[in-house]
Amino acid sequence: VWPDLGDPADIDYALVWMPEPGVLANLPALKAIFNLGAGVDHLLADPSLPKVPLARTVDPDMAMRMSEYVVFHVLLHHRQHLLYAAQQRRQQWQGHPQPAASEVRVGVMGLGSLGADAARKLSLLGFATAGWSRSEKSLAGIDCFHGTDGLKPFLNRTDILVVLLPATDRTKGIIDARLLSSLAQDGVLGGPVLINAGRGALQVEADIEAALDSGTLKAASLDVFEEEPLPPSSPLWHHPNVVVTPHNAADSGALPLCRGILEQIRTFESSGILRHLVDRQRGY
Amino acid sequence: VWPDLGDPADIDYALVWMPEPGVLANLPALKAIFNLGAGVDHLLADPSLPKVPLARTVDPDMAMRMSEYVVFHVLLHHRQHLLYAAQQRRQQWQGHPQPAASEVRVGVMGLGSLGADAARKLSLLGFATAGWSRSEKSLAGIDCFHGTDGLKPFLNRTDILVVLLPATDRTKGIIDARLLSSLAQDGVLGGPVLINAGRGALQVEADIEAALDSGTLKAASLDVFEEEPLPPSSPLWHHPNVVVTPHNAADSGALPLCRGILEQIRTFESSGILRHLVDRQRGY
């Protein structure tokens, strides 16, 4: 375990999460790199990253955890939990009209292994679920949009937006005033909701705060931020309609992921095939 | 719509939710009663209830809503939301170890149409799910316990107890000190959790409060209470580990249920068959 690596020439494979830039460049025998998480933006930002195959983690444990986070926060806003929690604090017993899940249009941005699993589970709970991805995808029971042309119609029909995109040059700052103002304003929840469990670099926090203040955005659950930890000065901490979590939506830890990675290495050694390869050009 | 009934002799079928005792006895042509909810305890408490067939509501809309409530509150406790919400209030950025769903043993008491749907959805989310019912049941993927003999082993393996039982003479006060102390004390959540979305008459609130204070019970989500609305004097309003909701777990309203009831009436008129009949002896 780094920094206690022994002879660097003995290391064939590296399993990493946000390693210090330059560390991997000092491993002369390296055959492949396994990223212990879904996002590889930190790794690709290291100009000295060796040109060996780089695999991201696609693991059922991680997908299970991410879907838990997504389903929980969709239900939290759908079932008006922030309103009921405030009522409980003042001992107020009062019901409110509750839309059916089928009346609520959830949209998942990013249909990789995490987004596809979350969309499937939301659909099983009865939500009117759609997805958007850069390239065309097809998922049973999910209304799939794609590409630049598909983005506006996807946002226009979305009451609860779940963002599970990778951070790349093309997605940086994608959650901005323009995107937020494209979400459905006529939905049964009384305004759109944002859930970002992807990457902080995707969002423009000043735009999210302005949209919350103007009512363009009704509420948000945010697990990731432009700067982490979220600075004490951020108004997001105290906004009554914002749920802040400390980047822990799908925190598998390294150990549960190792079994899958060992299998990957076995297959790679015997057949030369490495799955879940990162396309460095594309950025994910 | 009551009280504007026109000629009582014109009324063949009554759709009711907690009608005033005696009202139904004044309908001489009544052929059947449809209860606009799952629980019939209020109806059966009326000694003047006509001896016509009585059907409870078994409706996909109601099951969908109840499962939402159950899944939401199981995830709320599983994902340590009360802890993270408290941290957010003090601007504290700190993660905590998060068990996998497969390490958390959820137990659903009551495997009628609502309990079975909730158990199935919890199982899809990866929870180690078991169920208990008075008579023997079998559900795919769910570890089924039954009867008096099955209760203790069921409780002993349960970290999160979900109660969806009907209120009958046999279930009144079933959630008491003895039941709570039988729940698993060795689970990964650091203590058992109670979710009651059944009936207030099932629970002994003094015992729940004592168990929360002693640590026998870690947390609770309660939608129903011995007295509703929950009196302002109840300590449950302010307990830091208790979520109170105003008996709205599965509030379908009458209109979404009418389509199914009209179909029931059509079948009854043509074939004499009425489904979802209440067994008055059994009490549900």
Image (cartoon, coloured by chain):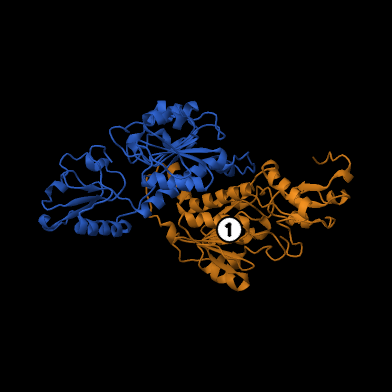
Chain colours: A blue, B orange
Residue A9 lies, in percent from the top left, at 10, 55
In the rendered image, the vertical position of residue A147 relative to residue A9, given as above or below? above
Q: Is residue A227 left or right of residue B38?
A: left
Residue flagged by tag 1: what amino acid is it?
Ala
Identified at 32% across, 37% down, the residue is A227
* Mark 1: few/some/many CA within 10 Å (<14, 14-19, 20+): many
For the image, the number of numbered tags is: 1
Residue at numbered disc 1: B116
**Residue B16 pos. (x, y %):** 76, 47
Is residue B148 positioned above or below A37 on the image?
below
Q: Label 1's element?
A: helix
Name the residue rendered at 30%, 32% in the picture: A170
**Horizontally, is A78 left or right of A4 in the view?**
right
Q: Write down the quadrant of residue B144 in the picture.
A: bottom right
Please state if B186 lies on the left or on the right of A227 as rendered. Answer: right
Which of the image's four quarters has the C terminus of chain A?
A: top left
* Residue B114, x across and y down, in percent: 61, 55
Q: Is residue B85 above or below residue B195?
A: above
Q: Residue at x 51, y 43 (%)?
A: A76
**Identity of the residue furthest to the bottom in this view:** B149
Q: State the image coordinates of residue A1 (x, y, percent, origin top left).
A: 20, 57
Q: Of B222 and B2, which appears nearest the observer?
A: B2
Q: Can residue A191 be seen?
A: yes
Chain bearing mark 1: B
Q: Classify residue B282 by image quadrant.
A: bottom right
